[in-house]
Amino acid sequence: MANVGGMQRVALKLHESLDAKAAHSETLTYNSYLLRSPWRTLHVKVPFFLAGAAWRIARAAWRDSVDVVLFSSMVTAALAVPLRGLLRRNGVRTAAIVHGLDVTKPVPPYQWFVPKVFAALDAVLPVSRSTGQACLDRGATPDQLCVVPNGIDVDRFQSPKNRSEARTALEDGLGAVPPSPPPDGLLLCSVGRQVKRKGTAWFVDTVVPRLPDDVHYWIAGDGPQLSAIRDTVDRHGLHDRVRVLGRISNENLARLYRGSDLFVMPNVPVENDMEGFGIVLLEAGQCGTPAIASRLEGIQDVITDGVNGHLVPPEDPDAFATAITQYRGAPDALDAAAQRAIDHTEQTFGWAAVAESYLDTLRAVWTEGRPPRSRS
């Protein structure tokens, strides 16, 4: 499952957490139906998966063996439309998690259908306030909405015991390509599918040239913007400071998080392509890598300014440069920021706590017909 997207990973981890809670509960019964597929075959498998899911849900409603159905995204929530009458006749409530692009995808037939999905649901559970506003803009009602943030597996990555050792492990794992980041300099990293909204090309073009020579930047992930990023590196002659890694293994991803000093998420606004949350921010924080990120969309629900990182105005190169260079030559400040990021991430976004939030919300949906007020 190394090649799955953020929405799939969230669904899998939530499933594991709910399954664990049901195993230790005398009152909770939980059943799931999952599609496990890499991106390259997802489009082929989805129609068969949706057909199977519709049959399973309908059969459970007929047998009176389900109270609430939770859809893991707006894609699967589409089933609520044809099943609406059957479910409501049998007293079954429905809720859907909304991530961002699954509600904003700028395809006219899809946008025509989105309000119909909202009308068929009892509860809409966006992962951030920005995603919630996108839902309201497309027909969801305030009474349906309850923001429940994404979570993180607190055992997936371990924080580094020693920054120097972590840097050495990173260079060994990815192959040391001279010149390596200076021992006393800063190593920045970004991780994600390289699309325009991620702002990586913008950051290389406008921010990196403003930074001192001992600040290096490594970029992981593939996507349609990868060639633009490489072209920008070429244009500015930044090969000695910027390394484009492309897709890397989970093992090297952990090394990158641990071996970097700061995680950068320089998102830029792109119409109809929002950042619904930002799981990579939590992964970095879990590894003791505080973030410098755009104050934009769902990112604002992940980063608490001055706690697990810093929020700066999007497309403001001076603000990014200032936020980054405050840690240059300040190892004590960087260590303190790293520990704050670890503590905040595990205490606030651990899946056990997030899964409990989902259960509380679904209980309210079942008993009252709507979710409680948003938690964010």
Image (spheres, grey):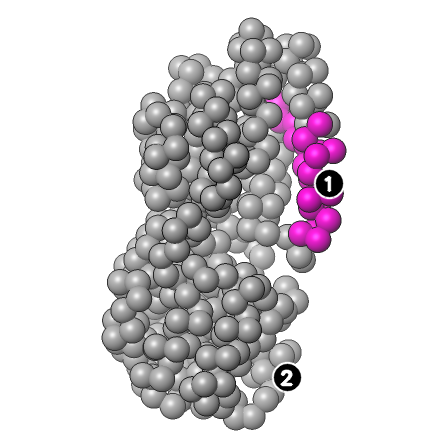
Give the residue at x 35% y 25%. 141
Label 1 neighbourhood size at 10 Å, few (<14), some (14-19), many (20+)?
few
Q: Quarter-wise, where is residue 130 in the image?
A: top left
Seen as rendered, the residue at the extreme bottom is 179
Residue 236 is situated, as x and y percent measured from the top left of the image, at 42, 86
> Distance from label 1 to label 2 (Cα)?
37 Å
- Residue 103 visible (yes or no): yes
Residue marked by disc 2? 175
The mark lying in front, picked from 1 and 2, is 1
Label 2 neighbourhood size at 10 Å, few (<14), some (14-19), many (20+)?
few
Mark 1 residue type: Lys
Give the residue at x 38% y 90%. 213
Query: Which residue is more in the foreground, 166 or 31?
Result: 31
Residue 182 is situated, as x and y percent measured from the top left of the image, at 45, 90
Residue 29 is situated, as x and y percent measured from the top left of the image, at 62, 23
The label on residue 146 is none
Give the residue at x 38% y 65%. 266
Q: Earlier in the sequence, mark 1 or mark 2?
A: 1
Query: Which residue is more in the foreground, 203 or 156?
Result: 203
Look at the numbered disc 2 and give the secondary structure of its residue: loop
Give the residue at x 57% y 55%. 155
Residue marked by disc 1? 45
Mark 2 residue type: Gly
- Residue 354 visible (yes or no): no
Q: Reply above or below: 255 against 73.
A: below
The span shown in magenta is 25-51
Residue 159 is situated, as x and y percent measured from the top left of the image, at 50, 66
In magenta stretch: residue 29:
yes
Q: Quadrant of the C terminus?
A: top left
Look at the numbered disc 1 and give the secondary structure of its residue: helix
Query: Which residue is more in the foreground, 84 or 152?
Result: 84
